[in-house]
Image (tube, grey):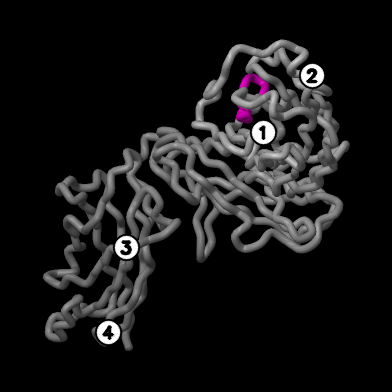
């Protein structure tokens, strides 16, 4: 006797092997070894008995990945020899598609057969769900010839603890014109800040771990880190204000998912929200962060580190080097500015990143050609690898003071 579990909507199918005569085995096909359904009196000679547990009680947390497995066991008793050469189909009806089959364990004597199930992703399924699985054990795929006592109904109670959630409905839509600056301080610049609310479950303890804010790009042009999430201390059972901070990006539509993780007991709970970030045309072709560079240096000829700058083009062109620099007339022949491209991380997503340094005696420190105290400017045109020059320059200023 062979045992097959086949997926029929809404049934699960899985192939294993069982022989009441001590041999046999399945070949991976749902109909392997199948013959015409025997008469009902043959089917009734074998019964499904001792199904355990009689109630599945499952507790878990909201999570993207399937939970740990649960086991259904049953005996097949009677004159198993009468089923030699037949295919026995085990079909588990799961109308809500809550479970998936992980494994089966079949015993040749028909005692203690097991089906290992696990709960699929429980994202967005917090609370208690009651349902019933129906286990059919049949001699044909259509289950016109069930074994005795089949089908067997197994009720379940699924209790899922909630995760921290963003209260706003998914997807969250954020729009901004290219080049806009919504927030800027000495350390960071954001195109736009979007207020959201975090719903903290009542049994929450601790905080969101360092890795608990995970952005995943779901469109080819979406950066891995679409935004940052900023929030105060979290209080159990409270609604907590938070901010999603979006950086400057080229014109385009960016679609990402944000997964929030937090500990619920000793298990990691998760929630997911989709975020659409739309950067619209504004007529501006280049965005520099900061918009201008300025530094003050002494008259000693020493190099002074200036600000770093992100270079972002509306059309997503990558400007990887300095093309040319137009110095103010009072600079004479002194090339007092250096810009060096570096890996810029999140600030330069969709653009490039440069460090600056300045010296009144020139970047080669030729003391004979030092500039006197005063104000000097330069207009920097960046270039792509192909030599295409940026349509709008970056303005840089240097103030030389007497030392």
First of labels 3, 4 by sequence position? 4
Tell me which label, 4 or 1, sits earlier in the chain: 1
Left or right: 307 in relation to 207: left
Residue 198 visible in this rendered orientation of the protein? no
Residue at the disc numbered 2? 44
Whether label 1 touches label 2, CB < 8 Å: no
- Is 206 in front, or is 359? 206
Q: Earlier in the sequence, mark 3 or mark 2?
A: 2
Please report the residue visible at 76 percent of the width from the left and 28 percent of the height from the top. 79
Q: Please tell me the numbered disc located at residue 354.
A: 3
286 to the left or right of 264: left
Residue 158 position within the rendered picture, expressed as x and y whole percent measured from the top left: 81, 39
Spatial separation of the CA atoms under disc 4 and disc 1: 91 Å
Q: Is residue 217 above or below residue 335?
A: above
Tell me the CA gap for discs 3 and 1: 75 Å
Q: Nearer the viewer, mark 3 or mark 1?
A: 1
**Residue 116 location, x and y as percent?**
69, 42
Q: Is residue 340 in view?
A: yes
Q: Circle 2: is it few (<14), some (14-19), or many (20+) Cα within 10 Å?
A: some
**Marked residue nearer the N-terminal end (3 or 1):** 1
Q: Mark 4 or mark 2: which is in front?
A: 2
Q: Is residue 90 above or below residue 373?
A: above
At horizontal 56% and vertical 34% (from top left) the residue drawn is 24
Circle 4 or circle 1, nearest the eye = 1
The disc label shown at residue 20, or none:
1
Q: Position of residue 354 (x, y in %)?
A: 32, 63
Secondary structure category for the residue under label 2: loop
The residue identified by callout 4 is 302
Under circle 4, the secondary element is: loop
Distance CA(mark 1)–CA(mark 2): 16 Å
Q: Quadrant of the C terminus?
A: bottom left
């Amino acid at each position: 006797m062979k045992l097959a579990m086949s997926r029929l909507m809404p049934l699960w199918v899985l192939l294993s092997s069982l022989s009441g005569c001590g041999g046999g085995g399945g070949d991976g096909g749902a109909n392997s070894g199948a013959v015409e359904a025997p008469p009902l009196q043959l089917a009734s000679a074998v019964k499904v008995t001792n199904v355990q547990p009689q109630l599945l009680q499952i507790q878990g947390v909201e999570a993207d990945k399937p939970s740990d497995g649960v086991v259904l066991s049953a005996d097949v008793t009677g004159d198993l020899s009468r089923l030699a050469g037949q295919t026995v189909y085990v079909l588990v009806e799961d109308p809500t598609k809550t479970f998936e089959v992980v494994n089966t364990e079949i015993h040749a004597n028909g005692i203690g057969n097991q089906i290992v199930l696990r709960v699929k992703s429980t994202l967005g399924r917090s609370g208690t769900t009651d349902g019933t699985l129906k286990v059919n054990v049949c001699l044909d795929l259509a289950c016109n010839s069930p074994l005795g006592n089949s089908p067997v109904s197994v009720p379940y109670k699924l209790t899922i603890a909630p995760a921290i959630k963003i209260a706003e409905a998914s997807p969250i839509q954020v729009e901004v014109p290219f080049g806009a600056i919504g927030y800027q301080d000495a350390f960071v610049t954001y195109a736009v800040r979007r207020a959201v609310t975090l719903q903290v479950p009542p049994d929450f303890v601790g905080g969101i771990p360092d890795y608990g804010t995970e952005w995943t790009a779901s469109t080819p042009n979406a950066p891995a880190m679409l935004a940052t999430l900023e929030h105060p201390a979290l209080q159990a059972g409270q609604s907590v204000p938070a901010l999603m901070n979006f950086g400057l990006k080229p014109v385009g539509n960016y679609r990402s998912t944000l997964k929030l993780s937090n500990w619920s007991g000793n298990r990691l709970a998760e929630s997911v929200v989709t975020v659409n970030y739309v950067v619209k045309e504004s007529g501006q072709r280049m965005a520099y962060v900061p918009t201008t560079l300025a530094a003050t240096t002494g008259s000693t000829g020493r190099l002074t580190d200036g600000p770093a700058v992100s270079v972002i083009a509306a059309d997503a062109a990558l400007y990887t080097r300095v093309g040319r620099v137009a110095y103010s007339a009072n600079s004479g022949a002194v090339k007092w500015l250096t810009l060096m491209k570096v890996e810029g991380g999140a600030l330069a997503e969709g653009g490039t990143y440069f460090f600056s340094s300045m010296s009144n005696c020139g970047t080669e420190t030729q003391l004979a050609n030092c500039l006197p105290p005063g104000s000097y400017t330069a207009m920097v045109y960046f270039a792509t690898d192909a030599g295409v020059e940026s349509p709008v320059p970056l303005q840089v200023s240097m103030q030389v003071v007497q030392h």
